[in-house]
Amino acid sequence: MSDGSARPKRVLHIVSGMNRGGAETMIMNMYRHTDRRHVQFDFISHREETCDYDPEIIRRGGRVFYVPSIGQSGLMSYIKNVRDILIEKGPYSAVHAHTDFQTGFAALAAKLAGVPVRICHSHNTAWKPNPRLWDTVQLHIFRRLILSYSTALCACGRDAGRFLFGGKKMRNKAVHLLQNGIDLDRFRETNSLAKAEIKRRFGIRENTMVIGHVGRFFEQKNHAFLLDLTAHLKNSGISFQAVFAGDGPLRPQIEEKAARLGLEGDIHFLGVVEDIPALMQTFDVFVMPSLFEGLPLVLVEAQASGLPCVVSDNITEETDLGLGLLQRVSLETGFERWTEEIVRAVQTEKPRWPDIQHSLTERGYDAKANLMRLMNIYSIPAQEGQ
């Protein structure tokens, strides 16, 4: 064990940007439980602007380095930029890349810099809604790079592992399944008085069904479908309020469409919300019609809150935590079927907290327990990581 005067071992996470996405929140959930006297996280971000979690990272002693993405700088410049940071700001015990099909280039840069542990992490089950032949060829090339230069592979679920690393690696159990863990204690149900206050805080009306969605405004989240579904609910005479939390490049477009559909009074756009556990307490049902996903952390959070969830069948069955809360529906079935499932879901009896806690812990969604597994992958003794 290191003594108190030793410098902490440093791990560099490579991300697109530390905004409030599932992978980023998973990293922060473990970072908050890390004993930073012995282990410290730094970050390479491809976003020059300040991201949601950057101030907290800096408060906790971490550093955020900006490196332009491959698309902005070119492949050779990207590899050199990452290598230079590793050499100049290190030494680093491990590099943990979360940029899916680009992780192989980060692993190569880390190898060139002499970093002993190089982890490529898959967080998605696809990277384009309708991949063409060239996309598939590219994926195979990227996969070869990943397998050549990484020392460990991680995935948030089996489907995500198969997508990025291939079925053979999954069959050979060469991929660490590291679920997107959460801080379970934050999801205990609050009492009715507290719920009313939370609704007032977020501007959510009382005495109406609240349909909730949390997700960044990107194509894969399929907000356009969600708007059309909301319009169908309204035309069906169902009383509700929809709440969309999150931000992203497509938000203005979705807000404009909501206005064209006459839904201004029915949808509440909250933007980025820090206290997701509190917000979840205001929902009656969680709806997620994604075109593709890895294993979305927000669905784990929703079920941890005891929320019934109606989701597209593009989302892996692994998201079902065995609590009777998840219903997967095809996007091809039409809005009537989705409406029926939403109405039915609202009537679902909420599981008891001990059952929720047991289910999530048993399935590997406890962030504290996952931190110990992660330190083992980093080859850092557990007592140094917490």
Image (cartoon, rainbow, N blue to C red):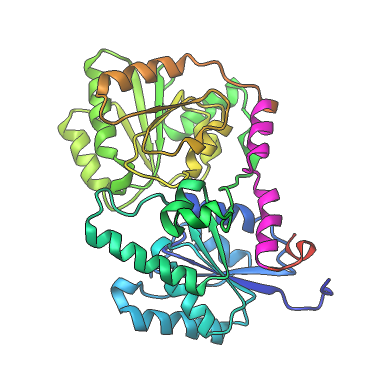
- The residue depicted at 57 percent of the width and 58 percent of the height is 174
The vertical placement of 203 against 345, above or below, is below
Residue 205's x, y, as percent? Answer: 40, 23
Residue 23's x, y, as percent? Answer: 49, 53
Magenta stretch, main secondary structure, is helix
The vertical placement of 142 against 357, above or below, is below
Quick check: 100 left or right of 223? right
- The residue depicted at 52 percent of the width and 53 percent of the height is 170
* 60 and 124: which is toward the camera: 124
* 385 and 140: which is toward the camera: 140
* 377 and 42: which is toward the camera: 377
Quick check: 357 left or right of 302? right
- The residue depicted at 59 percent of the width and 27 percent of the height is 194
The vertical placement of 289 against 385, above or below, is above
Quick check: 104 left or right of 176? left
Quick check: 363 left or right of 196? right
Residue 334's x, y, as percent? Answer: 24, 24
How many numbered callouts?
Answer: 0
Q: The magenta stretch spans which residues?
A: 355-378
- The residue depicted at 35 percent of the width and 72 percent of the height is 69
Residue 249's x, y, as percent? Answer: 28, 53
Q: Does the magenta stretch include residue 53?
A: no
Quadrant of the snapshot with the N terminus: bottom right
Q: Which image quadrant for residue 354?
A: top right
Q: Does the magenta stretch include residue 360?
A: yes
